[in-house]
Amino acid sequence: MAITLARQANDQLSEAVKNYPDRFAGLAAVAPQSPQAAAMEIERAIQKLGLCGVLINSHTGGKYLDDKNYWEIFAAAEANNAPIYLHPRTPSPEMISPFLDYGLYFAGWGFTVETATHGLRLIMGGVFDHFPKLKIILGHMGEGLPYWLQRIDNRYSLQVEIGAVPKMPRLPSEYFKDHFVITTSGVCSPPALRHVLDVLGADAVLFAADYPYESVEEAVSFLDNAPISDQERHKIYQTNAEKLFKLGITNGSNDTLST
């Protein structure tokens, strides 16, 4: 059923993009529970339907994509130059219990903890050593990870020193900076934006509004008035997305990424 639904969704999305090519671009849905079918759907979506990336709602039944059973998905994404947007969802069944009180399981906290953990698992699981051209997108200013990179490197290095984890070819922060792109979705905070620009650079940040869950007007007003350079603003609004998704937009519009 999931495989069929993904194909149907991608067919409909492709039609919308073809009908309004100056306004829309699309990320393909896949069913990760069937990695082979997901890999085939990525190829179809990119090569035949004209979509420009993949969206996966984080874990699948509590299983994460660092599990090598899923690596066909990464191979297909890399081969088709398709970035993967790792979209948040509620924490996995194994970790959700402490989040159920006070609404912590939802977007304000549980989504971030769960998705940031998934991103770290990809790094620590060696995914990017096997797929050196793979790009992962994280929303919500990187789900907090840009603010923790120094700490993550520091504690990782200690664990390597005491023999708790194997040494990777590079530090976790280096993998993050080379393979992850973040969006501004749902975070309208000038200090947060300034921090990610300082840590990751302006080429690694995309504008996103998180519609319909957040206000597009607020997101645009935030970036229009953020204390950043015009060059940084132009990259975030337009040229970074053009490059990553191979959009070829030349009309100067500020169309929004809604994830």
Image: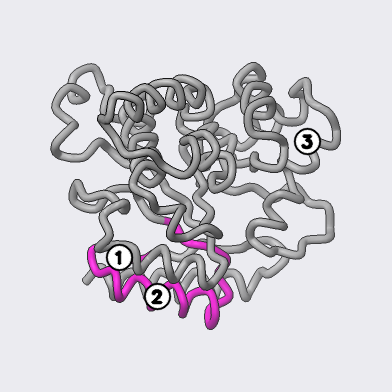
Residue labelled with disc 3: 233
Q: Give the label on residue 41, or none.
A: 2
Q: Is residue 163 above or below residue 29?
A: above
Q: Give the label on residue 31, or none.
A: 1
> In the rendering, at what x and y percent does residue 145 appear?
47, 29
Q: Depth check: 128 or 59 in front?
A: 128
Q: Circles 2 and 1: CB distance less than 8 Å?
A: yes
Q: Amino acid at mark 3?
A: Arg
Q: Residue shown at 66%/19% (left/top)?
A: 190
Which element carries disc 2, helix, strand or loop? helix
Q: Residue shown at 43%/59% (left/top)?
A: 130
Residue stretch rendered in magenta on the structure = 30-55
Q: Depth check: 76 or 60 in front?
A: 76
The alpha-carbon separation of the residues under discs 2 and 1 comes to 9 Å
Q: Is residue 21 above or below residue 204?
A: below
Residue 198 appears left or right of 215: right
Identify the mark nearer the N-term, 2 or 1.
1
Which element carries disc 1, helix, strand or loop? loop
Q: Residue shown at 78%/20% (left/top)?
A: 227
The alpha-carbon separation of the residues under discs 2 and 3 comes to 34 Å
The alpha-carbon separation of the residues under discs 3 and 1 comes to 35 Å
Q: Quadrant of residue 205?
A: top right
Q: Residue shown at 25%/68% (left/top)?
A: 2
Identify the mark nearer the N-term, 3 or 1.
1
Dot 1 surroundings within 10 Å: few (below 14), some, or many (20 or more)? Answer: many
Q: Depth check: 185 or 231 in front?
A: 231
Q: Depth check: 39 or 175 in front?
A: 175
